[in-house]
Structures are given as structure tokens and as C-alpha cells.
């Protein structure tokens, strides 16, 4: 622990911590470190001091007690502040100093912790303030705000209790707005507030300003472990912090008349990244009024008209700060009687679009280098640029317009509270939600997290909803005052149109448009800045990025986003086409003909797909009953079995599919997974009698036959059932047909003069014998195809590693496999014994109670699943090199391939590539580059 | 490869291989090695020679060709045989030598490979034999047998084709038995057989005896990889052999009139182990007639009356052989014209009962030492002694009696063919099958394997059915001629009573009784020999043997069998009692009261089971609607929740259960697993409306409520769903109640003056946090119980290791766990991704095609699951020692704990104990002893 508990800042200096920027931020918190830094570079800041994060840690270690040594240090620092701010004393009845007490951790947690303003006001000093400012209304308004804030945050007396009093008072006085209340009214209100305080706290409101101060420090420390803050850290994955610092700073007032004001701004547009000064201000208001979204503020440029000198100074500070921090800043300022004070600067939250543009432009401006630009953008924030945009051709017209707060389009079912949103998301996972609120507050973050988009009826670009939504890359429209919310009736009206809860509304966060209904979306494409950043990223990147795609369209889209191959082409959807499913169902219902199978075996016919000779015949021994006398007769019959006959029409379809994909991926490898799901997924289930009747008619069997087969195929735990490589081991025709389709497609594409690199992937292998048997068979089929065509194509045969046993036996498997592709979805399921479909009962509790730090289906469980992966890679590589002198190619094709943290992990454990959905390819490229650079945007 | 391909034996000597007994057996096969050995110790054996197993291996390496160097060696050895057997020449038209050509691998595979007898007969030599023996009938009968055997086994012409001819001939001649045919008839039959041969083989029956010889050697080698032999090796888990040797030996004839005969015998009773000469013989017959069970033979003792001198000589040989081999021998002999020849000796197969008695008695006779006795008995064979016996009090009387061939009682559904039995077992796993056949043959082994018992209408104690059944410890009755089989009508009659296929019949293999219907069984107990062997085994054993038991009765039974504690006490069945299930269902349907939960949390109440205060109150804040005006009101309410109220009645039941078990296990540790299965298993399913109605009525809710909850709890993959420790993490009341029941029971038993060692086992842990949270809670509950009672009891808290992740994270988990118990059922499921319920679709194919060597649910998969176990043990032990300076106790409680091979594995990887079902405790004790002795009966 640092020897010093408290650091003073003010004037043009700040006490030195002796630490680098990172250490300073850890000790003083982001806000405290930046206040000190601003002082040092000559920016006007009201004097104050910071109690370190280490004091917070000590506070908790000592059972929620401020460590003894810190007390005199705080008192001493307070004296310095008094000296630096015109000698005003805290609680002075004549000319009191007021201070703010604010939290500030090393990482920003906006609105998650407590703040107390106007601290130092008492029954005596309020009069001094009134006299000195000649503004008793202001003095009593400040006092009643202090009692409310202090009472509710430090002493646990609910805010609503105070609100109740002001409502009563307004009703009594016939006042509409708070500002309609007179100084005397407010004086009376202070009395009532103190009564409320006494009733609930069982003590008088403290008249000793130092007592106020220490209780307020406690309150800030306590809020570090409040539910809101814990929930926020969980969602934002913030761990490893010591606690929050406390910043005590002389108050300045933006609400002292029309020569005062307050504002928040960004040094660039956090929405688009454009290099313009961006923000809002309010004349005659306190800072909280801007952020809380209660009054709709004015755009910053207008300040040039109202206070040209202040504006000029502010523009200068904007430039100084950017040059100093080499980053876009989010600033707060207050003007008191024409004098400008900066209250805060910090790295500004921004949309993905803005992050990309700012990083690229700053690099071009030589503020930062290209590598820093690559490290600056959080990979997940690219999601924002890659999210579907509303189709401009849609007929659905906007009925209202609000402030465009976070770009992108979102359609969702209207939900009115955060709790209801969370509940809905748990009950109907995947259903899009649009959270519609008057304004949002930190209590709402969990609900905002599950929503597709956010719409509020009040607030500006810096309101809570706007800031949070931009941080998360969620479309958001704020301040749309034509939206009226009626929670009791469970409906809203938008410009007079009634919309019930659960009905669809669409917002366009890029334009501010609000539409009733569901607007279709279109795929996004890359901007020039985006492309530039990707180019820079690729210079650092070490591993390849492939995509999961199973259509030519997806393949082309993925290549556009920079995919260097297909890591997973699933083949099952190809069986679901209207003209295909009947054939596949016929296959499933076909009966085995033991006599023919025996004869074929004897005559060395693997399958007609292996020979390619669909008209071959075979001599079958059949036992025939001649009127009670059984006799064995030899008959010459077509070699093809009922199952093969059913499958044959699918060969052409599959071949055509593969040709399309190979052409699209010209020159890049394409990993094709053989059929994986259990067969029962292709039949109508028992409760679907109508469906079964249709199928029965279509393929010419009875409903009873279908249901008998459904019963046979029924599984208790289909995830661990008859699927993956187990299918072609029992029904080899399926695999043979697929291999033939792949090889014939490759031959065709090669004939067309394109380069083709098929990789045949056999799923769900646990023991090497599964692979070796199927590989041998696949080679036989491929050889036959190539011989018949007179054309040779290169291909590889490998396997998915998705069972714990495959990791353990990777040495054996690598003797046969030419590549490994980790299927981390299934691997996670099997390693944890979690069925992804069934975690709803306990996963929310697991995350809430920190049984797990994060959902392992979202980010790879490094210590469990990840350890198995390491074992698999180590064993597989060693064995392949020893046995064949070859490097074993290893990738990942689970959904984790598009999760930045997981990509970093894959880089670290030595994979050759990751594969993800087309729209996550750029995210993976960036994450892989950052992994190679040894630093990620999350460290910022 | 050995330089010599062929070894001669004959007279009182045999060519030396220079190898020890084991090496000699590997080179010459069991039969060949023993023939040579018998010559050396002066036992009369017809001369012959053995072609080594290495020649067989070379035969396959060279694409089924006898290696060139072996050919002259065979020819030379043949000359020696001719010289040693009176100078008779093979194929000599005057006085021909006939030879047998038999297989013989290092491990016995009775009846699985080819044998050709009477080799050397040709159109010319058959006349010489007829003249020399003055018995043309015998000569032509031998010749027609040779053509049949040679044609069917060496040349692939079906036996049925020859059978057809003899049937025709008998019909023509009005002959009833084969022996009714005259010499001329047989001469004619030879012609017809040769025609059959020519038609199918497309060549004449070879008249060159050497050509016969070499083709016969080929046939024996080929049969090594015949389907029957492969299937047998799979079931018997025989691996690592080079191949079969071939024994060519001068023929002697037991069918040369009434001074000739043939027999098979055991040096002790293979059924009971009694030290008596045991066997059968037939006068004027060839050996195959005894073994095939076609004629019912005479007991060996009767030979003393018919051929007293031969009998005396045989009794002497019996004694010589036992002294030499120090093992019970299975012998074959033939008497030709009053002269005794021994044809074979080998270790005799025996029932488990016999194995135990023989081992113990031989040790007492000082033939072997105690350690050898322990190693002699295959652990699984004890199953035989531990199988339920038929209840002697049953009213069901025997309707017929056969020969008691393998002891124990078995009831099963009548099935008439091996194929149907296999099919039935696949379709209805667990349903008992009684295989009823006229006789069995090597083709039937797969069907015999799946049957509970075997009943045949012909054959004696040495028939195929009897030998195989004894080897496997399956009850068997043979030679019951009152059983008539009508395959066409799918029924049998037993002493005139018609029994349809699928109806129950019971056999008593100890007495030979056959009963119609299902006879109740009773538990077996230990014999004196058995107890002695166990005492000897325990002297060598290093690991402890516990049992899986969840009732006092099972616990007592297991202690009787030597269990040293309970390794797995499942608690779920305790919820299914008629008076309990309603309470548990009420718990499942109880609604969460969020306000009360919040208040309890604030007031520090974990649960009423944790505090023990069921009447505690809590101050709950409730929002109450006063005519549209919502107001928060504080109410004082019972602290107990609806879920706890529902569970409370179960506490007493559980406590009583545990008291019973603790008392039974006085002084031994008892591992109790907290509730494991998913909750939906306790509710009626959707298709059971009637059941739901009953439950609804019983617990006072609506059917809709029940089904709504069933829907909520429905899981796609329940094996990987909301179960195990996930239950108490979400519903902590269940765990609290169970822990309280355990600790209160322990306190009560301690008060009664008994020693008690409860081990609380938390199932399905994958991450240490699951364990640490639940452990903390359990300790709080236990502390409260002990404080209230003023009594302290020792207990441990540990976990099941049944998820791959638990093995990988065993180091972390061992920081919290006081013991590990491997749940290898689930571990196997997750490691392979195999749902035990759903392997029916592919496991038969996997075993047939050798994708897996053995069902991993039967014996631990050493290379996959076993590797994970090793990782878990290594990580767990290292971490526990480092962190707590303690040895981590590790056991296994999956069903593998009773599988001998798995027990050996558990010993090797350093477990402290294995736990298995009560009746497998002695098997585990013996397997553990053998593991410690570094040798198993399987090596024999």
C-alpha cells in the first residue's frame, strides 16, 4: 500500500504519485488521475483531492471503516482546498466552501456509484451562501438537494420520500415546475426534507460539515459493492480492481444565473467519429441536469453565440486535451459567472463506427501510429459497423423522430421496464426486444443489455441511455417526445398511434427515425476507414481467419469481409430443401436388405457411391418358400440398395451446392463437415400427425411406418446420441454419397480452371478407429471418382475435435487426421456436462452468484475446456510430426471463433486459424491482430 | 521367428523347443504343447507333430500361403510319424496311416476352429483300411466322413449338401439311424459324396494324401480368422495371439467295435469342484460323437465295469497329470482295441463354484500355494457363486429333469435361436432370455452370451452347451429329452406342456430341474471355501472395497460379503416412497417468494434447515395496493418458505434412513450423495394425464399447474441438464435439508454408542466454486445441528468426479474436497459424448466392426476415460498435499467398480478404494488381490 492516502490537486499543479500513467490511474481512479493531469497541463480545474483506491480496499478489509491514518490526511487536504479556493472554509457561515464527493475507479463505470453534491451546507452556512451569492433561492435549492442526496445515498433514506414532499409542495403552491417554487418555498421544503430525514434516519441531518464529509466518503466506498455496480462489472467483465477512489472537489455552480451554465462534450463525434466538437450544454443548470436527461440541452456550437469567449477557451482546451492524451476525450465543464472550469476528462465511449474512424484519422493525423490505431478499437465494437441496417427501400415510414444517439437499425417487441425485458429474454431467448423508457438510469442496465435497441422519450446525446447504448454498439434513439408511455395500460402511443407491449417498433439510431412495425434489414458493407484499419490489422495478425458458411452467397460475403477460407461448411441444411427432404426421408425409412448386403460384401462392393456404377448387379442368395419347403435360390439383382436408391437424387444437389461454394472460395480451402445431426431431426415428431400424414403421402409409406421409425430413433439425450461419425459408420451410404459429391464438385471446378482445396471433415470422432475406418472409405470413393473423371484433385481428410476423449486421444487421432478443427460448442457441452438447450434453469443463478465468471458458450472456458484444447494441440502436433513429419493444421469452428477473447486464446495456444460467421470475420481479424500485438482494447 | 517350423512328438519324447512352459504354449499352442509334455512324462499319446503358431502368422503375412521352408519340414515330420506308428504310410493302399489335423492356439477356443479327421483316405487306401481292420463298414464310414469334413471345412462346400445325401440314402433304405446303413450303403454314399464334392468344388476329391494334408493345414489356418473365431475372441477378450498352431497326429479309432471307445473327462468335477474323476465315454464311437452331444454318453465310473484295466490306467494318468500341471485337467482319450491313448490334456474350464473349491483344496493339498490359489480364480467367475438361487419354498414344481451342467437358477423368456436371442436382447435390453436348443454349436455363442440360461434337449456334461455355460457361469441344463422343440410353430413342449416362445421357463442348473413359469430367487451366501479364498485374497489386497447401497438391508448384505464401507449411498430413491413423494412434489411446485427471500437474506437466514428454527419470523417489506395507491408495508411473517414447508416432512424420513444405514455400517465410512436427478423425474409426464390428476388431487394443485411446471422443467438432454450440484445451487433448501438429516442421524447414532463416519458427497461438480459454495453452506448447517445437540461428529465433504472438466480442474477442486469419488458412468458418457440410453443405434456396429474393443460402460476405457482419471488423481493429490498437507482419499463408485479389469486399473492408478454393488464385493476383493499380485486369472 502506498504511504500516501490522499493526493491534492489545484491551481496549475498536482501532488506527484511517482507512478506512470497506468499506476496513477490504478491508484487515483480514472477521474482523479485526469483531474490531476489537467491541472499539470494548465487547464482550469476547481481544486480538490483524491482519496486513493487503496484506501477503499483497506476500508473493506477493516470491515467498512476508513483506515485511521487516512483521517488526518483528508483533513489536511481539505485545508489546502480551502486555501486554494479563495480561503473559503467548509461550512463557513459567512462564505462557505461547498464540495462535491464523487467516485472514480480505474475503469469508468458511469452512474454506477454514488455522488454527493453541495456538501458543506448546514442551517448556518446556507444563509452565508444566500448572502454571498445574493441568491437565497439558489442557496436553499442547493441545501434541499444536499439533504436529498446525502439522505438517500449515504443514509439509506429513499429518494422517493423526498420527491413526495416536493410534489406536495408544488401541488400546494400550484407550481408546475421546480423552478416555479420561490426561495421561501424552498426554505420550507428544507424543513420538510429534514423532517423526512429525521423520521427515517432516526437522527438529525448533520450540522457538522466534516461529519457530512466522512459519511459521504463512506457512502462512495459502499457504492463500490452496490448491486448496480456489481452487475455492471459483470456485464462489462471488469475484474481485478482494488476499489473506487473518492474525489473531493470544490463545487462550482452552473446554476447561478444566465452567465453560468454546464455542459458535457466529446472532442470528436462519438457517434460517427467525425473530427468535430460534439456536445450539449444548459444555461443556468447543474451538471446532473444534462446527464440525467431531464431537460433537453442545446448543441455545443450554440455556446459560441451565447458565451463566445468561453467557447473559444473550450475549443482551445479540446485541442490541448487531444494532443496530450492522444485520444478522443469525454469532458464535463461548468461556467460560473462567466468563468470556465473543467470538471472531468476521460477517454470517451464511442460507437464502433466512431472508434474505427477516430483511430484511423488520428493515425493519419500522426497523433498515434498505426499499431496503436489497431489496438485502440475493441473488436466487439465492430459489431456496430457490421450490424444489419434498415432497408431504405422499406415502405414503412417514420411516425416520429428523436435524437440519433447510437447508430444502426433495430426492430423489437416493445417492453417497458428493464425487469420485464430480462424476464422476457429468459423466457423467449432470441426474441428481439425494444426497451422503451422515459429515460434510463443505472438500474436499467441489465434490461438494456438484453434489448436489441433502446428508445427514450426524454434526454440528449449525453443521456444515460445514449452513453450506454453507444458503448455497447446498440441502436438507440433518445429524446423522442412524441413517445408517451402508459405503463398501467401496458402500451405506448407514438405520435398518437397506440402500440401495445409485445408489438413491434423499429428505430433507426443513425437518423433518429421511429417506425411502427418491423422494418426489413440489409447487410452492411465496409467503409473506407474500416478497410484501412483492417489492412493495418492484417499486417500484425499471425493466424488466419476463416468463415462458417454453407452457401455461395455467405461465402462471397465472408470473402468481402476478408475471410481466408471456409472453416465450417455444414451440410445438413442442404438436406432440408423442399425437393430434397423427401429423398432423405425415404433413405431413413428404407429397410436393410441383409441378403443383398451380404452378397455385396462378398463381391467387394462398398456402395454404389463408392463404385460410381449405379447399374451394377449382384448375385444374391435368397431363401424362398416353395409351399412350405424352403429353398435357397441365387438371383441376379441390381446392386443398389433401397437406401442408396433414396439417396441417389441428393448427389446432384449436393454436388451443385459444393460447386457454387468452391467457385466462390476460388483458391481458398473449404472444410466440409459430413452430415452431423441425428436422423430423427429429419422426421415429423409424434405430436405432428398432420405433418406425418403429408410426409407419408409424399414418400409413399404409412403414418404408422413413419412413427415406428420415429420411435426407433427417439433419443433420451440426442446431443450424445446417434449422430456425427456414428451415422456413416452405421449407414455408410450417406458418407459415401457426400464424399462423392465433394470430389465430383472439386473435379468440375478444377475443370473450369479454378483452384479448389476441399477438406473433408468427419465430425464427433472420439476414437481413432472411427476416423480410420471412414477415411479409408472416403479415399476409396475419392479414388473411384478421380479415376472415372481422369482428373486428380488435392483434398484432405481431418476431423472435428469436439469430445473430451478426442483431446485426450489426439495423438492417436492425429496419426490419421490431416487437420483438426475444434468444435468448442460441443466440447464445452461435454466438458461441463451442460446441454446448451437446458442451462436456462441454472445459468442465470451461476452467473449471478459467480459460480462461473462468464457463460462458457460465449467465451471459451480457458481453465477447463481450454486446458483440454491445449492437451489436444500438444498431443496432436507432436504425434503428427513424429509419424508423418508434418505440421498438423489446427483451427476452431465453434461460435467462439468470433469472440475476441476466445480468438486471443486461440492465438496463444498456437492455432493456425479461427473460423466464425461472415459478419464476425472483421472482429476476428482485429482480435487476432491485437493478440499478436500482445495487447487488447480491453486493457484501456 | 523360430528357426524350426515343425516339432515332432511321440513315444516317450518330444522335440525340445528350448522355451519355458509359457513360450512353448505360445509357439505350439495349448494342445500341441500339452501333447509334447504328455509324451515327456510318459503318458501314451499317438505320435504326431505340431506346425507352430509362427507359421500361421507367416501364412497370413504372405497372403494366405504356407511359407516355403515349412513344406519340407512338414514332409519330414510326417515321415517320423509314419516310422513311430508301426511304419504305416499315409495313403498306403495296404495299411494306411490316417491322421487328424487339428487347430490349437495358445488360449483355448473350443470348437471355434476347423478339424479334419481320417485324413489320408483315398479310393485306394480305403480298401487297405477295410482289409487291415476287416471292417469295410468302418473304412467307408471314415471315408465318407473325411469327404464331408474336408469338403466343408477346407473347400467351402456346405455340410448340409452332404447331410442331404445321407438323409436321402436313409430314406431309400428305410434306415432310422446312421448305423443302420450297411458297408455297401456307405460305399455308395462315398460315391454320392464325391459327386457332391465335384459339383461344388469343381474338382475331384484329391487322391493324393499329401495334397489333402496341405489343404487341411490351410483350412485350419483360415479358420483362425473365421467369423466364429473372431466373435469368440471378442467376447472372451482374447487379443495378442500370433495365430493357431496345427497338430497333425496319427489317428486312433474308438469306433472299431466294443473293445474300442472314446471319452472326455475332468480330473475333478468342473461343476462343483469336488475331487472326483468326472466325465463321460461312449463305447464304439469317435470323439466328436461325445462332444457334439448327439448321443448321450455313459458316466466315466462305469468304464471300471466295462474296461477295468483301461479304467485303472486312466485313473493313474489322472493323478500324474494333476501332479504335473498342478491344475485340474480336461482330458480326451480313445481306446482302440483295448489300448488307451491320450489325445489331449488342458486346464479344464469350470464353474466359479468349482474354481473356488479346486483352488482352495489344491492349496490345502499343498499342490499349490495360497497366492497361486488366489490367482487361479477369475474374479468374474465368482458371479456364479453370487447369483441368486431358486427359492426352495417355491410352489412351482419341476415338470422335467435334465443333466445339471452349470449350477444356479435362471428364469427367462423362451427363445429358440441364437439370432433371435441377440435380436431380442438388443430390442429389450435387460429382459431375461432362456435359450432353448436341441444342442448348441459354436455358431450359437453370441446368443448364449445374451441368455440368462441355456436348456438343451440332447448332449451330456461335456457337450458344447455345458462347457461354454460353465465357463461363463451361466446356469445350464442339458440332455433334457422331454423338451421337444417346434421352431415352425414357435413353441416347445416340456413333458407334454406347450410353452410358446416368449413365455417363461425356469431351469435349475444345480439339480437339472426344469419348471414352467418364473420361480422366485433368493440371495446366495458364502461357502466355507469361498470365505477361505477371500481371506487369502485380503492378505494380498492393497485397496479397500466398499459397496453401493442405499438401505440397511443392502448394507448388511454387503458387509457379509466383506464391504469396508459404503462408497455410494444414493438418496433419490428415498424421495419416492409413497408417503414422501407428495411432499417432494409440493416442493417442486412451490413458488418463490421474492420479498421473503430478500428479507431473509438481509436478516442472515440461510434456510430454516440451516438454522433449525422452523418457527423463526422475518420482517418482510410488501407492496400493497390500497385502492390503486401502492404502498410498502412491513409485515412480520414466518421465515419458512413454501419450498421449505413442503420439504420439512422429508427431514424425518431421511434422518431415519440414514440412522439405519449408519447403524448397519457401524465404524465404516458411509458416502452419501446429495440428490442428483433432474426434478422432472419426480413429476408425471405430459402423456400421463391420469397420473397428473392423481398428483394434482394429492398435493392440492391443478393439472394445468403441474403440466406448466413439467413444461418449465422439460429438457432436451436431461443427462446434461439441471441436476447434480446445480439443484442445490438454485434450490439450496434441498441440500440444507439433506445435510441436516445426515448430521442429525450421525449425532443420534453416536449417542447410541456406535461409531459413525459420514462423507457428504456433492455430485456433478465441474468448477470449484460449485463445491466451495455448497460446502460452506453444508458446514453452516452441520455446525447448527451439532451446536443444538451439544454433540460433535466427524464428517467429510467431498465430491464426485464425473465430468471431464472436474478431472482437468481437479487441482482447484481438491483445495476444497476432502475426497474424490469417480463417477465413471457419467464420466464415460461425457468423455465419449455417448448417452447410455441412446447407444443402441450404433454400439452393436461399433463392437462388431471393432471401432471399440469393448463397451466402455462395461470396462473403463483406459486410454480415454482412464487418462482423464489419471490426470484427475495426479492433479488432485498434488494439490491437496500442497495446500493442506493431506492425502486425498480417492475411490470409484460407478458400475465399473465391480468389473475386475476396471478394479485392476483402479489399483494401478492409485485409488484408495473401489465401490460396487453388494453382490460384486467378493469379485472386487479378488480382482484387487490379483492386481496387487500383478497377475490375473485372465493370463492363464
Image (spheres, coloured by chain):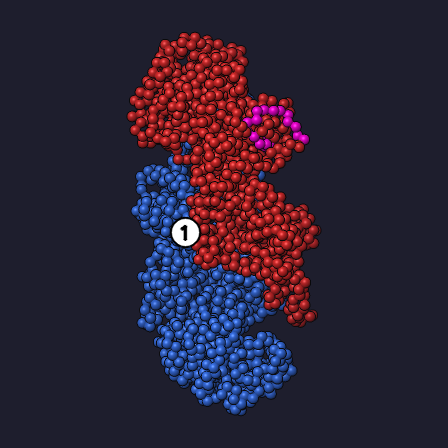
Chain colours: A blue, B red
Q: Over which residues does the magenta segment extend? A: B395-418
Residue found 32% across the figure and 69% down from its top: A369
Q: Position of residue B901 (x, y in %)?
A: 47, 40
Question: Residue under circle 1?
Answer: A822
Q: On screen, A880 above or below B358?
A: below
Quarter assignment of residue A388? bottom left
Q: On screen, A481 above or below A716?
A: below
> How many callouts does the rendering have?
1
Give the class, few, some or many, for how many residues have Cα within 10 Å of label 1's Cα (few <14, many ≥20): many
Residue found 52% across the figure and 59% down from its top: B772
The quadrant of the picture occupied by the N terminus of chain B is: top left
The quadrant of the picture occupied by the C terminus of chain B is: top left
Q: Is residue A787 left or right of residue B278?
A: left
At numbered mark 1, what does the secondary structure look like: helix, strand or loop?
strand
Q: On screen, A275 above or below B91?
A: below
Camera-side residue: B484 or B539?
B539
Residue found 33% across the figure and 58% down from its top: A542
Q: Position of residue A705 (x, y in %)?
A: 55, 38
- Tell whether position B411 is magenta: yes
Q: Position of residue A165 (x, y in %)?
A: 62, 79
Camera-side residue: B558 or B821?
B558
Amino acid at each position: 500500500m502506498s504511504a500516501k492516502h490522499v493526493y491534492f490537486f489545484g491551481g496549475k499543479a498536482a501532488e506527484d504519485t511517482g507512478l506512470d500513467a497506468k499506476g496513477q490511474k490504478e491508484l487515483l481512479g480514472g477521474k482523479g488521475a485526469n483531474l490531476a493531469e489537467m491541472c499539470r497541463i494548465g487547464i482550469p480545474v476547481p481544486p480538490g483531492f483524491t482519496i486513493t483506491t487503496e484506501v477503499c480496499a483497506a476500508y473493506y478489509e477493516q470491515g467498512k471503516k476508513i483506515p485511521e491514518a487516512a483521517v488526518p490526511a483528508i483533513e489536511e487536504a481539505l485545508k489546502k482546498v480551502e486555501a486554494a479556493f479563495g480561503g473559503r472554509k467548509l461550512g463557513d457561515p459567512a462564505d462557505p466552501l461547498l464540495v462535491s464527493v464523487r467516485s472514480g475507479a480505474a475503469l469508468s463505470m458511469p452512474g454506477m456509484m454514488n455522488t454527493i453534491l453541495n456538501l458543506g451546507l448546514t442551517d448556518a452556512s446556507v444563509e452565508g451562501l444566500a448572502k454571498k451569492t445574493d441568491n437565497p433561492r439558489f442557496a436553499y435549492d442547493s441545501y434541499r438537494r444536499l439533504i436529498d442526496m446525502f439522505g438517500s445515498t449515504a443514509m439509506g433514506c429513499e429518494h422517493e420520500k423526498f420527491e413526495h414532499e416536493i410534489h406536495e409542495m408544488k401541488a400546494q403552491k400550484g407550481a408546475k415546475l421546480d423552478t416555479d417554487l420561490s426561495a421561501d418555498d424552498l426554505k420550507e421544503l428544507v424543513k420538510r426534507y429534514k423532517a423526512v430525514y429525521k423520521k427515517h434516519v432516526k437522527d438529525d441531518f448533520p450540522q457538522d460539515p466534516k461529519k457530512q464529509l466522512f459519511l459521504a466518503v463512506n457512502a462512495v466506498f459502499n457504492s463500490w459493492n452496490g448491486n448496480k455496480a456489481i452487475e455492471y462489472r459483470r456485464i462489462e467483465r471488469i475484474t481485478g480492481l482494488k476499489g473506487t477512489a473518492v474525489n473531493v472537489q470544490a463545487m462550482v455552480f452552473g446554476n447561478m444565473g444566465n452567465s453560468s451554465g454546464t455542459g458535457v462534450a466529446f472532442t470528436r463525434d462519438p457517434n460517427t467519429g467525425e473530427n468535430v466538437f460534439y456536445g450539449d450544454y444548459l444555461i443556468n443548470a447543474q451538471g446532473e441536469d444534462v446527464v440525467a436527461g431531464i431537460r433537453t440541452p442545446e448543441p455545443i456550437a450554440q455556446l459560441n453565440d451565447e458565451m463566445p469567449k468561453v467557447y473559444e477557451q473550450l475549443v482551445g482546451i479540446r485541442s490541448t486535451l487531444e494532443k496530450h492524451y492522444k485520444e478522443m476525450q469525454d469532458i464535463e465543464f461548468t461556467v460560473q459567472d462567466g468563468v470556465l472550469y473543467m470538471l472531468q476528462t476521460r477517454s470517451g465511449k464511442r460507437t464502433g463506427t466512431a472508434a474505427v474512424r477516430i483511430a484511423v484519422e488520428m493515425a493519419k493525423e500522426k497523433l498515434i501510429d498505426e499499431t496503436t490505431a489497431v489496438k485502440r478499437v475493441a473488436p466487439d465494437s465492430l459489431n456496430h459497423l457490421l450490424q444489419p441496417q434498415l432497408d431504405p427501400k422499406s415502405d414503412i415510414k417514420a411516425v416520429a423522430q428523436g435524437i440519433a444517439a447510437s447508430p444502426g437499425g433495430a426492430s423489437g417487441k416493445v417492453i417497458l421496464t428493464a425487469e420485464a425485458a430480462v424476464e422476457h429474454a429468459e423466457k423467449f431467448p432470441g426474441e428481439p426486444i425494444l426497451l422503451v423508457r422515459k429515460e434510463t438510469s443505472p438500474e436499467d442496465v441489465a434490461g438494456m443489455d438484453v434489448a436489441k435497441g433502446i428508445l427514450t422519450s426524454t434526454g440528449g446525446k449525453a443521456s444515460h441511455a445514449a452513453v450506454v447504448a453507444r458503448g455497447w454498439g446498440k441502436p438507440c434513439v433518445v429524446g423522442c417526445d412524441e413517445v408517451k408511455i402508459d405503463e398501467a395500460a401496458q402500451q405506448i402511443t407514438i405520435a398518437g398511434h397506440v402500440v401495445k407491449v409485445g408489438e413491434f417498433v423499429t428505430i433507426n439510431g443513425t437518423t433518429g427515425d421511429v417506425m411502427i412495425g418491423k422494418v426489413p434489414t440489409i447487410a452492411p458493407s465496409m467503409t473506407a476507414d474500416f478497410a484501412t484499419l483492417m489492412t493495418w490489422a492484417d499486417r500484425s495478425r499471425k493466424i488466419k481467419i476463416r468463415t462458417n458458411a454453407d452457401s455461395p452467397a455467405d461465402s462471397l460475403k465472408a470473402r468481402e469481409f476478408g475471410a481466408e477460407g471456409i472453416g465450417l461448411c455444414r451440410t445438413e441444411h442442404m438436406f432440408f430443401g423442399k425437393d430434397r427432404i423427401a429423398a432423405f426421408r425415404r433413405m431413413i425409412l428404407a429397410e436393410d436388405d441383409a441378403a443383398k448386403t451380404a452378397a455385396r460384401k462378398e463381391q467387394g462392393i462398398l456402395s454404389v457411391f463408392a463404385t460410381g456404377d449405379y447399374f451394377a448387379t449382384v448375385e444374391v442368395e435368397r431363401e424362398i418358400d416353395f409351399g412350405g419347403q424352403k429353398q435357397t435360390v441365387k438371383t441376379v439383382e441390381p446392386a443398389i440398395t433401397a437406401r442408396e436408391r433414396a439417396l441417389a437424387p441428393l448427389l446432384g444437389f449436393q454436388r451443385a451446392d459444393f460447386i457454387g461454394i468452391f467457385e466462390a472460395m476460388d483458391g481458398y480451402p473449404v472444410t466440409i463437415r459430413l452430415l452431423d445431426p441425428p436422423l430423427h431431426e429429419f422426421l415429423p415428431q409424434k405430436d405432428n400427425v398432420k405433418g406425418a400424414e403429408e410426409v407419408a403421402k409424399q414418400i409413399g409409406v404409412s403414418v404408422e411406418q413413419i412413427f415406428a421409425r420415429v420411435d426407433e430413433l427417439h433419443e433420451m439425450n440426442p446431443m450424445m446420441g446417434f449422430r456425427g461419425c456414428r451415422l456413416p459408420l452405421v449407414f455408410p451410404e450417406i458418407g459415401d454419397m457426400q464424399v462423392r459429391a465433394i470430389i465430383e464438385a472439386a473435379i468440375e471446378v478444377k475443370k473450369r480452371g479454378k483452384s479448389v482445396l476441399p477438406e473433408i471433415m468427419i465430425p464427433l470422432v472420439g476414437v481413432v478407429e472411427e476416423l480410420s475406418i471412414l477415411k479409408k472409405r472416403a479415399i476409396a470413393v475419392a479414388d473411384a471418382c478421380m479415376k472415372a473423371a481422369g482428373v486428380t484433385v488435392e483434398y484432405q481428410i481431418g476431423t472435428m475435435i469436439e469430445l473430451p476423449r478426442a483431446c485426450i486421444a489426439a495423438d492417436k487421432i492425429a496419426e490419421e487426421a490431416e487437420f483438426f478443427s475444434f468444435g468448442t460448442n460441443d466440447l464445452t457441452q461435454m466438458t461441463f456436462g451442460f446441454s446448451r438447450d437446458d442451462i436456462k434453469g441454472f445459468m442465470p443463478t451461476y452467473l449471478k452468484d459467480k459460480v462461473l465468471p462468464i457463460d462458457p458458450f460465449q467465451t471459451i472456458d480457458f481453465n477447463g475446456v481450454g486446458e483440454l484444447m491445449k492437451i489436444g494441440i500438444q498431443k496432436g502436433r507432436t504425434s503428427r510430426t513424429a509419424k508423418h513429419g508434418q505440421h498438423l493444421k489446427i483451427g476452431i469452428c465453434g461460435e467462439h471463433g468470433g469472440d475476441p477473447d476466445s480468438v486471443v486464446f486461440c492465438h496463444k495456444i498456437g492455432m493456425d486459424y479461427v473460423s466464425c460467421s461472415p459478419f464476425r470475420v472483421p472482429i476476428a481479424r482485429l482480435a487476432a491482430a491485437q493478440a499478436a500485438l500482445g495487447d487488447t482494447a480491453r486493457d484501456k
